[in-house]
Image (spheres, grey):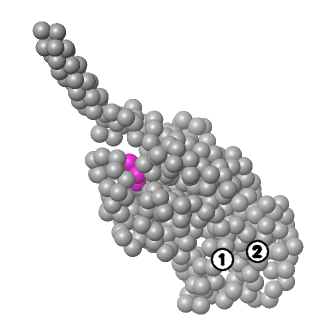
Amino acid sequence: MKRTYLLVAGICALGAQCLTQNIHAAAGGDSIKIGAIFSVTGPASFLGAPEEKTVRLFVDKLNAAGGIHGRRVELVLKDSGGSPEKAVSFAKQLIEEEKVLAIIGPSTSGETMQIKALCEENEMILVSCAAAEVIVNPTAKYVFKTPQKDSQAVTWIYRTMKDKGVRKIAVVSSNDGFGAAGKKQLEDMAPAEGIEILANEVYDKQATDLTDILTKIKGTRGVQAIVNWSIVPAQSIVAKNMRQLGMEMPLFQSHGFGNRKYVEQAGVAAEGTLFPAGRLLVVDELPDNHPQKALLAAYKKDYEETYKEDVSTFGGHAYDAILVVTEALKRARRPDRARVRDAIENLKGLAGTAGVFNFSPTDHTGLDLTSFEMLTVKDGKFAIYRK
């Protein structure tokens, strides 16, 4: 009799455990961990701070709406301070200790290149918020990025130059990963686009005055325009120093110029600056039927109302990164890394802040030339450049 009682009790306990597990599963079960590495502090905080704020806002809204298939998303965020060494250490933590499903970030190209091989070796999904084309060229199975390609930005710059009758230029770039990658694209693509580079100078990414370099360029005969390729505060310094030296030639910047703070820091010297960028900065100029307008307007409104600061394309890159991972999760239907990776690679027609994404096995950026507009600074604000 005692044995029968114990057997029945055991069966009841097992049934209760199964019922609890089923209820737990129906309610969503464990959260889904997604790692993020951003330069929230340090010299690249102008990138990482809006990225961190954006992702927190996105995840909070997602969870408030029920998460993904009833499961909450847990953000495990690390602040690298812009240090490649810290980025490597944090990537190892996220992979080995936190066991996240995917990593978004880092903020800079140099950091991303330091962890690219590590993520690939561990079959860890990495969706970078950095722009250098070498991140995805050559393609690595588990590595993606959301900013537009360097080569696409160069194409827009060179074609706009030719429209303005500019054929001979000077290039200045920062001595970091983004600067080096852009410098190479500018050099490699110039001959085919009919552009001649007469001067080519590299400056320290922490430089606070570029008068010496720009004076040398001013003395170089035939220069019709300058291209600055960087993401550092020197973008503002170039414009100010050019004005101080009386250099009235056009200034082109890379797609790293997409932050109003650069305009504010340069003041009136920023007027007329030309640069390719996504449409987030000029959403009010888009027609209502544009495929990105609703998303861009909603993100801009939510971000600016929450944080009381202007939205930037850098925060937009993080928005796109978390959007890509969560959309792939929805389609994979379970947090299986291999299935989610495959789902990312097959995302088509996904409107983000940088453009409409169409990933493929050979394209881990998923954006084409139409993701850019040529912008300019007019009366201290960004506007679409009109010929």
* Residue occupying image coordinates x 83% and y 60%: 208
Side (left or right) of 143 relative to 252 = left
Amino acid at dot 1: Lys
Residue 171 is situated, as x and y percent measured from the top left of the image, at: 71, 78
* Residue occupying image coordinates x 31% and y 33%: 28
Question: For the view shown, which residue lies furthest in the top direction?
Answer: 1
**Residue 385 badge:** none
Whole-number angstrom distance, CA of label 1 to CA of label 2 = 9 Å
Residue 363 is situated, as x and y percent measured from the top left of the image, at: 41, 71
Compare residues 44 and 259 and report the one nearer the observer.
44
- Magenta-tinted stretch: 323-327
* Quadrant of the rendering where the N terminus is positioned: top left
Q: Is residue 243 above or below residue 161?
A: above
Q: Are marks 1 and 2 in contact (CB under 8 Å)?
A: yes
Residue 292 is situated, as x and y percent measured from the top left of the image, at: 40, 56
Which residue is identified by label 2? 202
Asked if residue 310 can be seen in this view, the reply is: no
Badge 1 crowding class, 10 Å Cα cut-off, few under 14, some 14 to 19, many 20 or more, is: many
Q: Secondary structure at mark 1?
A: helix
Q: Is residue 175 magenta?
A: no
Q: Secondary structure at mark 2?
A: strand
Helix, strand or loop: magenta stretch: helix
* Residue occupying image coordinates x 63% and y 45%: 79
Query: Closer to the N terminus: mark 1 or mark 2?
Result: 1
* Quadrant of the rendering where the C terminus is positioned: bottom right
Q: Is residue 368 above or below residue 108?
A: below
Amino acid at dot 2: Val
Which residue is identified by label 1? 183
